Amino acid sequence: MLRPPEHPLRSLYFVNGWLDAALIGGLSIIVFVALRLFTSNHTTSWAIETASILSVFVNYPHFSATVYRLYQSPDNVRQFPVTSLGLPILLIGAVAASLWQPAWVAPYFVTLFLVWSPYHYSGQTIGITMLYARRSGFEVGRWQRLALTTFVFSTFIANFAYPRSGDPIMRYGVMIPIIHFPAWFGILMIAVMCAAAAALLYFVFAWSRTQARLLPAIVLLPAVTQLIWFLPGTQTAMFYEFIPLFHSLQYLYIAWAMQIGLRMSEQAGAGAHRSIAYESLRWLLRNCAGGIAMFIALPWLFFWVNLPMITTAGVVVAALNIHHFFVDGVIWKLRNTAATSPLMMNVADWSASRVPVTV
Amino acid sequence: MPIARTVAGLLFVLALLCCGPVLAQELPKPLSDPVTGREAFLAVVIVAMMFGGLVSFFLFGRVSEKTHVALALLSVLAGGFSLLVLFGSFLYENPVAAIFVLLLLIGMFKLMSLFESGRAGRKQSKE
């Protein structure tokens, strides 16, 4: 159960309603609608190139932000030694095995990442929903959480039950066969999803009636966004290429709020706006550089492997992603009290630096 | 009763004498066959899992329970991945088995989401 807010909030949003709604999912929904209406259902090189360029500024920094938060301090490494040190060793072993046996280890390593990835997206959807629920005062008890998680994870499973194509696909330089499920499985998952959605809406209406006000739409926005990403989104070839980008954008926004909240709480109120801009720019540049090092420089280190570069890069990318899934599971728990407080602040609090945060 | 035991013993010895040579002929000689890539991969995974266990053993009393749990989960991940490599073709060939494999993978992801979080330890302390 979420703890009640530790101090009265000035606003539900980190910056404002428009920006929060856009980055948490609104922008992705607008892009989806535009691509659905105005493009054919075939991936074009334009979509792939655009998504690749934007990756450098959004996707890669989102991975780097996670890594930076864990490894920036020896204390953090000591707090999570297996995640920080043990897991990379295991993943290096998995990369070595995949490059050693590219025919039948690499496809399963990439498959593991491709199945884990939407699971990770679902976890983020639940996390952000819980965050805004807490900020809005919507109490998420056992049954509300069950309805939310059932809805979110059923969209994830239904996404697998309805593949876009029946043919094997080339992902990250590795040929991946399509998983075929029985027809009834997809129908079952849609039924479960609808039942969970109905239960969730019941809790929302019950809360709204008790509180005599409507639940802020942003609380439900992450779940609606995930529904669009995973069902009509994956069926829309052009939009499919951009889903990781929007997931990363969501993540970066929350990670940025966390970073600024922590930094601003260490500084006095004077010149705080300039500090926010400076700290944001510094953080973004650092993460862009880190992302380029991880996703462009690191795969190049394997140039000597006698395999196509795209295959080598695909295996390394799979390892970086799996590492990210683990790291993301622990970084929000770094020194729990401090890790929660910045996420309950907003831009006004950062400027005034009124809320003391124990670091 | 002693007679019955003696008869049973004799029958067992006779059975061994009859079937023994046949069994001996059928015994495979795995070490004389060349190791396939898949067997070599399995061997590496087994070594990795043993290594994880040994690290946990040698760090007993020096690191927290949370770290031991995380090391155990690393072994689960290594074992789970090797099973996926061995039997993953079911995922693509048999639709019903695909459901089973997908649910197993989700279970493993859920388990890994508790990785080094200390939640397992908290649950234990509540009990």
Image (cartoon, coloured by chain):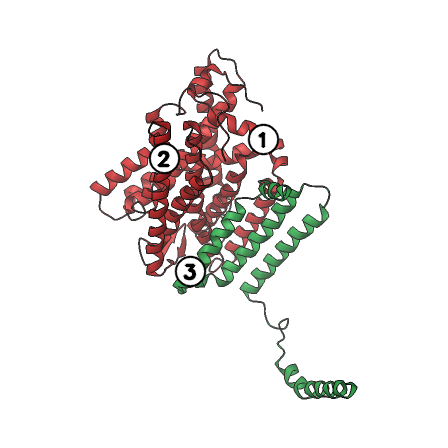
Chain colours: A red, B green
| Residue drawn at x 35%, y 31% as measured from the top left | A208
| Residue drawn at x 35%, y 29% as measured from the top left | A216
Q: Nearer the viewer, residue B100 or A247?
A: B100
| Residue drawn at x 51%, y 30% as measured from the top left | A3
Q: Nearer the viewer, residue A22 or A88?
A: A22
Where does label 3 land, which residue? Answer: B98
- Give the crowd class for mark 2: few <14, some 14-19, many >=20 residues within 10 Å: few
Q: Chain of mark 2?
A: A
Q: Secondary structure at mark 1?
A: loop
Where does label 2 land, which residue? Answer: A206
Task: Inspect the image, locate mark 1, and give the three-letter code of the amino acid beneath it.
Answer: Arg
**Alpha-carbon distance for marks 2 and 3?**
39 Å
Proximity of marks 3 and 1: CB atoms separated by less than 8 Å: no
Q: Position of residue A247 (x, y in %)?
A: 39, 38
Q: Secondary structure at mark 3?
A: helix
Task: Inspect the image, locate mark 2, and give the three-letter code of the amino acid beneath it.
Answer: Ala
In the picture, which quadrant includes the C terminus of chain A? Answer: top right
Task: Inspect the image, locate mark 3, and give the three-letter code of the amino acid beneath it.
Answer: Ala
Residue A335's tag is 1
Quadrant of the image occupied by residue A256: top left
* Relative vertical location of residue A280 with respect to residue B65 in this rendering, above or below: above
Quadrant of the image occupied by residue A218: top left
- Give the crowd class for mark 3: few <14, some 14-19, many >=20 residues within 10 Å: many
**Alpha-carbon distance for marks 3 and 1?**
40 Å
* Relative vertical location of residue B27 with respect to residue A101 in this rendering, above or below: below
Q: Position of residue A46 (x, y in %)?
A: 28, 42
**Alpha-carbon distance for marks 1 and 2?**
35 Å
Residue ranking furthest to the right: B2
Q: Nearer the viewer, residue A332 or A95?
A: A332
Residue ranking furthest to the left: A38
